Amino acid sequence: MPRSSPRSSPRSSPRSSAQAPARGGRRYAAAHVLLLLPPALFVLTTVPGVRALLGTAPGYDPFLDGFLNNAAYLCAAALCAVRTRRGPRPRRGGYLLAAGLAVYGTGNVVWSLFERGPSASFPSAADAFFLGSYPVTFAALVLLAQRRDARHGRALWLDGAVGALAVAAIASAALVAPILSVQGSWAAVATTSAYPALDLALLLVLAAVVSLFGWRPPAGLWLAAGGLLLFVVADVAYLFATALGTYVSGGPGDGVWVLAVVLTAFAPGWPATPVGPRMPAWARTALPLTCAASALVLLVVDHVHRLHPVTVALAAATVALALARLVDTYRQVSELAESRELALTDELTGLGNRRALYRRLSERLHRAPAEEEVALVLLDLDAFKEVNDGLGHSTGDALLHALGQRLQHVGAGVVPAGADPRHRALVVRLGGDEFAVALFGDCARQAHRVAERVHASLLEPVELDGLQVRARASVGIAVLPAATAEPAALLRQADVAMYHAKTRRLGTFTYELAVDEFASGDRFATADLLRTAIDERALALHYQPKVDLRTGRVDSVEALVRWQHPTRGLLFPDVILPVVEAAGLMEDLTTAVLEQAVDQAAAWLAAGRPLAVAVNLSATSLDDAGLPERVASLLASRSLPAHLLEVEITEDFLMADPERARGILDGLRRRGVRVAVDDYGTGYSSLAYLRQLSFDDLKLDKSFVTDLVVDGVEDPRALAIVSSTTALAHSLGLRLVAEGVEDAATCAALAAAGCDLVQGWHFAKALPVPALERWLAARDGAGAGSAAAAPARGTAPAGAGLPLG
């Protein structure tokens, strides 16, 4: 009497397999036909009424139920092996399935040859083969699942055990007495009940395997599931028929068994492509939970109506294993929660990371009322590389950890005690030396004040290895309504604000409320347009005159970059430079400005106006020791005398690498190019580099000039600084140039202090070439005897005086 041994489909492989006949050719198709013929004939004979037409008496028939039935089972095993051999690798699962079907078919052969008859015992040796096929199939399914995801192996075993025990408990409660009355043996009860229990256990495991494929498995797994369901139907029907004493060989139940093995045999050899509808996510857990609930019901019933001890024991074991499964699930969930927390945590500082910022910011924005605001304070440490390079990476890590704790403290102090927890500040480390603080609700309106507190907290010294290390940061702020804010846009806007802070001065912050084109998501499009303008040398250069205070004549002009955007009009450096920095175009931009400026100086020279041009060189463009040679080649190709070009270099570059600076500056000056120190007094202002390095001009930063004269009254302290700086420059053989001169009184004070050259809106804003030439012509025609008496008319737009660097 056949007992089923289902087996899942072989493991999916990335290599797609075609349908069996197409893949195997004629011999493969012929093998299918020959191996399917015995099962098909036997199933046909089990259809009610067919055996009567054949003239076969009811009951066991030696040919049909002996030879043909055995051939059907063995052919199914052979068919499974053939499909596995021609299927995709790996094939171990398919061969295990074929072995399970072969063991099952051997049990049927043993039963028909040696155990059949009135004196046959039950359970018999055939049942050993029948039941022995289950472990092979069960192990193959678990191995398949572990190969897919090893973490689920124990869970699959527990699910199968819970299902098997629950079915055994239910079966024993309903059928122990009828089966004992017919067969009179506890061994018979256990054996007969084991078949449907093991079928369901395999079905549970198969369901778990299907879940690993996203509840949409390949065709092979669907066929294996169909075979298992047929086994369950046939085994349950046999269980009842045995209990009632109505089982007869050759009935429909025997045909269902053969159909089950054939479906299972067809599981290997299919493509790995998912087919069919997606199974619900609860399918994997619903069946074990149902089994556990059924066992609990049996235990409750036992208190009202005494059940057999075997039933009670099986139900109790089911509940115990279900609890074990629950504990295992809890452990897995805890590990998953811990993994998720680790994935959202910065390992060095213990703060949240970039992923945490996006996730938690999205959650809070989703819950925030539409009228609220959200702010993001973004800070980037300045000169952090110097700490890493000078003190080592371990010291740099210690500094980041200490600063992270300070930011956490500042964030905790933002929300007063008893305030809405939703408004709690979120502090994260984005990576490297970048941190961010997100503010919500009322706190977002105080973003400027929070930024000041953050900035102040960073300025306090940190003791590292006995050294007092002070950190500085450039800070950007972005504020948006919660109803329209998105994490990516908020971060982009704060990033732009932070870059604006970096271009102005180290250790400052800027406050951005409006979203410009660069911050609103068009970063790459804007950068691409700017790259094209740089490559095509289509930048707009405006020139601001430098006036000699002794003669009143124009000594030279400074080239200042502009960009004519196709839709936004003329853009100034405060908008251009963040795009350039982010896109890595600074060196290209500097080269383009230098070439265009030299071309213009050559054009003026050819027109009879030898006018020197000053160009700002960025620090990134000065990393190349071959710069002097490249500049000399550029001048030679335009036939421009070297003294008509002046390069302006910031103090930061001079102090970052003094030896490299010495070589580059000496090389430029040997070739006749003038060199000026830009923004003198705002950087390191070390007197050492004034002695060690060679240049021609000092450009005093406009911050020393702006308040030199207020309401017609000179500030004696400011004037003392200017006078002493002028004396220092003259004693070193340098000229002093003052920027930001906006009125005649300041110009006169500078002249009295001995300043050599001045530039600013008092004379002219940065002008395009045609406007500058008209201004120069008008000045020449009027006669420029006194610098202070020759102001320019009109005003310049905000940011017009910002240089390239």
Image (cartoon, grey):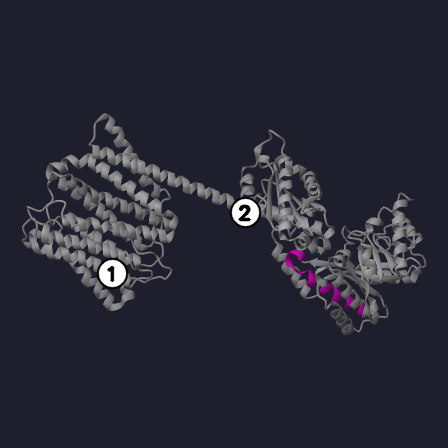
The residue that disc 1 covers is 81
Q: Which of the 4 image quarters holds residue 602? A: bottom right
Which structural element holds mark 1? helix
Mark 2 closeness class: few <14, some 14–19, many ≥20 residues within 10 Å: some
| Main secondary structure of the magenta stretch | helix
Q: Depth check: give the residue in front, 739 or 620.
A: 620
Residue positioned 65% across, 52% down in the render: 517
Tell me, yes or no, if residue 239 can be seen here: yes
**Would you say 280 lies left or right of 780 here?**
left
> In the image, is residue 79 part of the stretch drawn in magenta?
no
Is residue 183 positioned above or below 93 on the image?
Answer: above
- The circle drawn on residue 355 is 2
The image shows residue 159 at horizontal and vertical percentages of: 32, 43
Sequence order check, earlier mark of 2 and 1: 1
Q: Is residue 705 above or below residue 697?
A: above
- In this picture, which residue range is highlighted in magenta? 579-603
Q: Is residue 663 left or right of residue 552?
A: left
Q: Secondary structure at mark 2?
A: helix
